[in-house]
Amino acid sequence: MFVRGVALDMDGLLFDTERIYFRVGQVLMERRGHTFTLELQQKMMGRVGLSAIGQMIEHHSLDDDPVALLAESDDVYGDLLLGELRPMPGLDAWVDRLRESGLPFGLATSSRRKFVDMILPTTGWSDELAFVLTGDDVTHGKPNPEMYLKAAERLAMPAKQMLVLEDSGNGAAAAVSAGAVTVAVPNEHTRGHEFSGVHLVADSLEDSRLWDLLPEPGTEIPA
């Protein structure tokens, strides 16, 4: 096994946005007399836009129009996002390690493009991304492999030579199905997820076992 490029999820992996999404779910369900639960959040994780909203509607047998409910969700999330955004532990050190490895790395997130465009300017490395794929760029969200097959195309390499980092079961399943070298980095919201087929379940972005999957600085990367 050798790795020539890296694809990174965003929500719950690079930034602690799952906490914000949970608050959005609470607001939406409170308005409708329901309770937003961790079970429902886990069903929604990794899914794109209307697919995630569809899980919410199905779970509570809501009669809301999916498009209208998604718009309402976007409004609540947008109001909370920048004020509540926090990096995951070890993010800066992990990005430094990626830079040192010399491997191209990009973003493959189910988040909508408009929210990615709000988050990336808060970082000091967004201009170093080899690609940015969002939920707006795929037809089928995670756990479908489309996102990571497209990521491999953007990196111009077979998926089996691409390292993917994911925090959720749906995301990890998408990467495994695409044939990528998949590492799960679960957070407090996803530690109970199923991570079948992954190469490693890391403790955090600072896990030395994760870092060891990258070439040492100055290593010549095989073509």
Image (cartoon, rainbow, N blue to C red):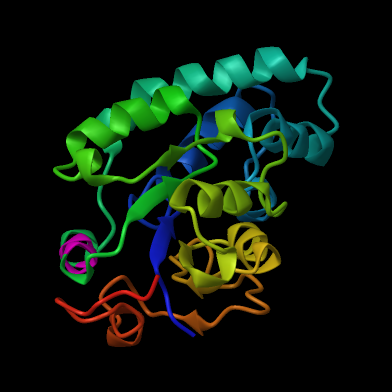
* Residue 114 point in image, percent of width and height: 42, 22
Q: Mainly helix, strand or loop, the magenta region?
A: helix
In the depicted structure, whether residue 46 falls above or below residue 176: above
In the depicted structure, whether residue 157 falls above or below residue 35: below
Query: Left of 140 or right of it: where is 203?
Result: left
In the depicted structure, whether residue 107 falls above or below residue 190: above
Which quadrant holds residue 158? bottom right
Q: Residue at x 23, y 60 (%)?
A: 91
Q: Residue at x 70, y 65 (%)?
A: 177
Q: In front here: 54 or 119?
A: 119
Magenta stretch: includes residue 178: no
- Whether residue 89 is visible here, answered yes or no, is yes
* Residue 87 point in image, percent of width and height: 25, 51
* Residue 199 point in image, percent of width and height: 54, 82
Q: In front here: 110 or 55?
A: 110
* Residue 35 point in image, percent of width and height: 65, 40
Query: Left of 171 or right of it: where is 133?
Result: left
Query: Left of 128 or right of it: where is 81?
Result: right
Q: In front here: 118 or 125?
A: 125
Q: In front here: 6 or 48?
A: 6
Residue closest to the far front = 223
Q: Residue at x 57, y 34 (%)?
A: 135
User: Which quadrant is home to the C terminus?
Assistant: bottom left
The mark tally for this picture is 0
Query: Left of 20 or right of it: where is 176?
Result: right
Which quadrant holds residue 50? top right
- Whether residue 11 is visible here, answered yes or no, is no
Q: Start and end of the magenta stretch? A: 94-99
